Amino acid sequence: MKKVLITGSNGLLGQKIVELLSHTLYGLNLVSLESRSVFDEEILPYDQLDLTKRQDVRKVVDSFEPDIIVNTAAVTDVDLCEKERGLAWQVNVGSVENLAYAAKLVGAKIIHISTDYVFDGNNGPYTESDRPNPISYYGRTKLASENVLLTSDVPSAILRTMVLYGCGIGIKQNFALWLYNNLSEKKPVKVVDDQIGNPTLVDDLALAILKIIELNKTGIYNIAGKDIVSRYDFALSLANVFSFNKKLITPVKSSIFKQPAPRPLNSGLIILKAQTELNLSMSGIERGITIFKNQLETINAQNSDRR
Ligand SMILES: NC(=O)c1ccc[n+]([C@@H]2O[C@H](COP(=O)([O-])OP(=O)(O)OC[C@H]3O[C@@H](n4cnc5c(N)ncnc54)[C@H](OP(=O)(O)O)[C@@H]3O)[C@@H](O)[C@H]2O)c1
């Protein structure tokens, strides 16, 4: 039985990949920063692990001896990365160095998650072979993390994705959840119409990771939703699927927000390689938002049953 170590298992993507792999025959070990797992630790073994601590990483990897490490852990708050550069580098790059070091000792392969923020957003959408040029510190750390793996002799697959959305237990707000939380309470939102890309249902990315494992692929893959749209168009589609009032959504330009980290504007990822080599069918926004809505309704029903 192959063994898979999943880092960031309490995060949005981490939870989805755990849910998916727990229905397969892979042996799992979960690790994340918090003291407790969001999953039942009797069924899915869990270690609290700060990936920036090399010896701790080595200890966990040495004792579990994974065949594959799926690394979803990162500091994902783009503006925080711009301000807390030391932390961003330590986690987003240092952790990958630590994992590569430990993986080499046990002969494990690493599947790592990267981002469209490695590009400047001047002329997207991008293929896997386009030249990166990050404009934010987060983007620089993620590009550096890719380079750690590409220059190591550890076999690796790097999955670039963007604008992840989905549900999970105690997860941070994502774009779709933020829209849902506001629009369901009839609160008006300002949404940028000059940031273009492919919003990605996190469940689809988890499935892509499973395919990468099963087909034993290495190298860089763009994994993102089928449709390339503006954030504003995504918000209108979400309002449509949920029957929220579209008049609550006002289109604005990114420049009004004065965010610390610049965003790639004309971005997007071309997913032809993944569609062809992995036979992946990534959801477009209508389908993705409908799945998201069904998941939210299930969670809300479970919560009201418990009350
Ligand atoms: N979200 C997006 O839109 C997006 C877009 C493109 C690429 N990505 C990439 O996709 C991956 C998954 O993103 P996500 O949205 O699932 O992120 P997330 O929900 O923020 O999860 C990341 C997890 O990593 C953990 N973590 C942070 N620092 C750690 C450390 N030092 N040691 C161990 N664990 C640590 C976090 O713990 P805490 O919660 O306690 O900090 C969190 O559980 C990341 O690599 C991200 O860069 C995300």
Image: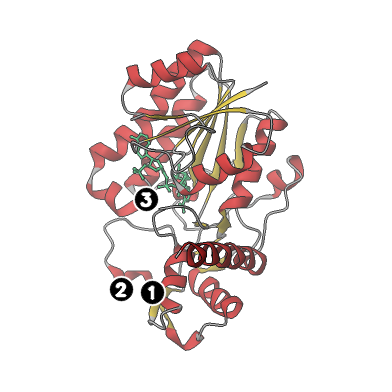
Q: Are marks 3 and 2 in contact (CB under 8 Å)?
A: no
Q: Residues within 10 Å of mark 3 (few under 14, many from 20)?
A: some
Quadrant, the N terminus: top right
Disc 3 and disc 1: Cα gap in Å?
18 Å
Q: Residues within 10 Å of mark 1 (few under 14, many from 20)?
A: few
- Looking at the rendered image, the disc whose residue lies closer to the viewer, 3 or 2, is 2
Q: Earlier in the sequence, mark 3 or mark 2?
A: 3
Disc 1 and disc 2: Cα gap in Å?
6 Å
Amino acid type, callout 2: Ile
Q: Are marks 1 and 2 in contact (CB under 8 Å)?
A: yes
Q: Is residue 18 above or below residue 126?
A: above
Q: Earlier in the sequence, mark 3 or mark 1?
A: 3
Q: Is residue 177 above or below residue 278?
A: below
Which residue in the structure is indicated by mark 2? 256
Is residue 113 in view?
yes
Instruction: Report ligand 1 position as a quadrant.
Output: top left
Q: Between residues 94 and 175, which one lies in front from this camera angle?
A: 175
Q: Secondary structure at mark 2?
A: helix
Which residue in the structure is indicated by mark 1? 253
272 on left or right of 74: right
Does mark 2's beta carbon lie closer than 8 Å to ligand 1? no
| Position of residue 158 measured from the top left corner of the image (x, y, whole percent) | 55, 35
Which residue in the structure is indicated by mark 3? 135
Q: Secondary structure at mark 1?
A: loop
| Position of residue 93 measured from the top left corner of the image (x, y, whole percent) | 37, 32
Does mark 3's beta carbon lie closer than 8 Å to ligand 1? no
Q: Secondary structure at mark 3?
A: loop
Is residue 127 in view?
no
Amino acid type, callout 3: Ile
| Position of residue 92 measured from the top left corner of the image (x, y, whole percent) | 37, 36
Does mark 1's beta carbon lie closer than 8 Å to ligand 1? no
Residue 80, labelled with which disc?
A: none
